[in-house]
Image (tube, rainbow, N blue to C red):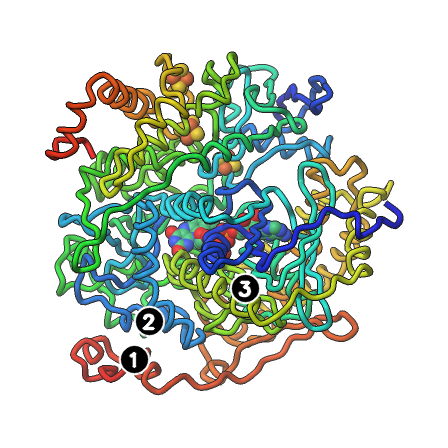
Amino acid sequence: MAGPDVSELQTFEHDVLVIGAGGAGLRAAIACAALGKNTGLVCKSLLGKAHTVMAEGGMAAAMGNVDSRDNWKVHFRDTMRGGKFLNNWRMAELHAKEAPERVRELEEWGAVFDRTKTGLISQRNFGGHRYPRLAHVGDRTGLELIRTLQDHGVHQGIHVHMECTILDLLKDGDRVVGALGYWRETGRFVLFKAKAVVLATGGAGKAWRVTSNSWEYSGDGLAMAYIAGAELMDLEFTQFHPTGMVWPPSVRGTLVTEGVRGDGGILKNKEGKRFMFGYIPERFAPETADSEEEANRWLKGDKSARRPPELLTRDVVARAINAEVKAGRGSEHGGVYLDIASRLPAELIKKKLPSMYHQFKELAEVDITTDPMEVGPTLHYFMGGIRVDADSQMTTVPGLFAAGECAAGLHGANRLGGNSLSDLIVFGKRAGDGACDWADKHDGGQIDNEQVLSIIRRATEILNRESGANPFVVQENLQEMMSHNVGIIRVKHELETAVEKLQELKKEAATAKAHATSQYNAGWHTALDLRNLLISAEAVTRAALLREESRGAHTREDFPGERDEWLKYNIFIKRGQDGEMVVEKRERAPGPEGLVAIAYSKIEDLESGAVGAEVK
Amino acid sequence: MATRTFRVWRGDKDGGEFKEYTVETQPGMVVLDGIHRIQAEHAGDLAVRWNCKAGKCGSCSMEINGKPRLSCMTRLNSLPEGTITVQPLKTFPLIKDLVTDVKWNYEQNKRIPPLKPRAREADGHHRMMQEDVDRVQEFRKCIECFLCQDVCHVLRDHHKHDQFVGPRFMIRLAQLEMHPLDTEDRIPKIRKEFGSGWCNITRCCTEVCPEHIGITDNGIIPMKERVVDRYYDPIAWFFKKVFGASNK
Ligand SMILES: Cc1cc2nc3c(=O)[nH]c(=O)nc-3n(C[C@H](O)[C@H](O)[C@H](O)COP(=O)(O)OP(=O)(O)OC[C@H]3O[C@@H](n4cnc5c(N)ncnc54)[C@H](O)[C@@H]3O)c2cc1C
Ligand code: SF4
Ligand code: SF4
Ligand code: FES
């Protein structure tokens, strides 16, 4: 393709283009359609297959159906504490307040959650959540969410473009006015014009070897926003979920839901010791059980007992497992044991955790109703992402919005389980509303042919190149490198090595070839993803290097412990004028007084009304 | 080092052939891992659909040794020794290699009248008992892998795509009809437009369902019964509905 004629490209025009059809993208598109907008929805896979489908445990919303002491303030406090107070105050507030109504609305659209004895939506316990708060359907809550939104969405007049990958955004001056993509099936290019664009593309976990994430998680949204001039933030905070499968190698990293621990599962080392009692951080000690006896009482529903230490936040549990393995007390294949078999009757395990039962039975030949699972940390979630305005979800680039895992702010330094699915529906809707509001006030801009052509050139070069790097090999090298140097425990010299290696990998990636037709060509797709993976990986590494403390999911061996000084800053990443990556820390605006008081309050004071009663 | 040979269908709508590839194996390897090794080492442009690699998204359906299965959940050591044959789903038009065009399924879904819930209770809640939603939840486990659609002879051999929505959408209909909050009536459409009469209860769909959903016995047969009830004896149906003996 030497010089294709842009006017002959297949072109779609929408008021709002939503890129990504997971929970966030679908919810955003539904919001746009509800406001009567011509809405386009693009996704790399088939509809209903996005990452959201894999979510297991549940979605957090303080409905108080199971424990009436729950309310938005307690949820807000848990979220801030889990995020080590680096969260965006306003987002944490909106999320806690709006999640219950967003969940109830799903029921209206056909979701069928597990029920309480009185017929309400049931809620389960999860790490870091003080009360049972996660609306769920067994261990397949993500499937329920995505299918509900999908089945509702297809009747709202949304234009769905499946198996279409967006390569880059198009700008008119400062503003985003469209995007260019290709169809996986044919490899043909397609142009989208839009007054506003919403990114809902998820994270970039595929830059690591051991991860719970799928191939789609190549950081496309992060990279496209970055190239378009948007700011990224908080990227040093990558969540390692404590319990991924460790054996066999084929499934290393595949998730084992936290629901196993929520339902009573316990962690043991090879000596059979329930080791989490030895890893309770001071801040959580007053609210955590200090004996097995107390933990067991809690599980039976004794409201005076405190929570078992297995349900501490993910950063704490992941580090504890890591430490046990390092100390030589790990399991046969380098993990620890997660035991539900000795805690619940076999029938109940099958009923409450059916997909875990099948996953282990079919993939590891382990029967979890009789034997313990072997588990270890796996890269799971990006707390960081594109910087957005809390209320409208607009990025720092006009006309460009972001929601869901690709956006930053809600989770701070560490996300609580279940707070992502609720994030998707709360901020997916807000992003849709925000984008519509923008579209009402602005015309469609001009498409710049030169931008279109240069994106097409970059993509087609890979197909035309006769010699060069094997994209699969470059990707594997990147994954290996990141797992080794930018893992759960970080240290200066390894992070510096990573920065150097990333420069080499970038050079290799620039020569990647996939010499064949463009029709459903996996090598080409992988080669195209490399740029995005590399930008995301570099952003994480540079931010991790700058933050000289350990907070939440970011642990520096050379700077142990939280440092008060660093609580003042978020780290931002932006593309410099010469295309270099600029990393800087910037001071945070102080939180509103009332919210600060709630976040730092003792739970007794919050519940007695001594603190926070005036906050509405 | 142990190895395994795969016979993989390569081609598009204009034709193609089986090609053999040999890759090294690791403990616990599944068929999809094998395909990925082939892509990385022998054929970078080999087309395959997949996402979760954990049996949750239903993308990686193909025919393995002649049987429709999820390739990410099929362990090599569960297959008989020797070459493993993999080919695309037969019931849908081929796009390339192992990828077929399943859009038809998405069109069927759009035709199905969505949930029409009754009003919420005064306190803003909907109340449903667990025992009343159990059967609905069974159908909602469906991951849309379309293996049941692939194997159903009405579609596979008789190509009645314009008259029968297939087992996947029969259980979607059943799920809506049995939903405790629903107030819509889809029975006439189930009979006419969605073609419940085409199913002759061979249960092939149920056999291949990776989610072990009782497609035929729990979903299709009750729908067929409701159709028969209605059209055989509409009065009885009316009484049931009005006086609350209905299954809703
Ligand atoms: C195994 C697992 C279990 C989890 N369990 C839970 C849980 O129990 N509770 C919880 O709250 N969270 C859970 N999470 C996290 C949560 O599922 C995700 O964070 C969330 O689903 C992300 O949703 P999203 O809408 O942001 O993006 P996704 O659902 O990932 O969707 C991204 C979409 O963007 C599209 N896309 C990406 N790039 C492009 C491009 N270039 N062009 C076009 N389209 C593109 C993709 O095709 C896809 O449609 C879990 C995650 C995993 C991996
Ligand atoms: S039971 Fe009915 S739907 Fe299922 S395969 Fe047989 S004919 Fe098709
Ligand atoms: S009913 Fe079963 S076989 Fe059919 S699409 Fe759903 S999960 Fe697949
Ligand atoms: S890849 Fe998701 S079911 Fe196989």
Up the image or down, A578 lies above or below A378; here it is below
Question: Is the C-beta separation of discs 3 and 1 under 8 Å?
Answer: no
Up the image or down, A302 lies above or below A574; here it is above
Secondary structure at numbered mark 1? helix
Q: Are marks 3 and 1 on the same chain?
A: yes
Report the disc number at residue A76: 2
Secondary structure at numbered mark 3? strand
> What is the crowding at mark 1: few (fewer than 14 residues within 10 Å), some, or many (at least 20)?
many
Would you name the residue on which mark 1 appears?
Answer: A598
Residue A519 lies in quadrant: top right
Looking at the picture, how far across and down is residue A603, in whole percent? 23, 75
Give left or right: position of B174 versus A198. left
Residue A357 lies in quadrant: top left
**Is there any visible trace of residue A210 in the rendered image?**
no
Q: Residue drawn 14% across and 62% down?
A: A303
Q: Residue drawn 22% across and 64% down?
A: A290
Question: Pointer 2 indicates a residue of which chain?
Answer: A
For the residues labelled 3 and 2, the Cα–Cα distance comes to 22 Å
Give left or right: position of A463 versus A165. right
Report the disc number at residue A402: 3
Which image quarter is the N terminus of chain B in? Answer: top right
- Disc 2 residue: CB within 8 Å of ligand 1: no
Please identify, in this view, whether the residue under mark 3 or under mark 1 is nearer the observer. Answer: 3
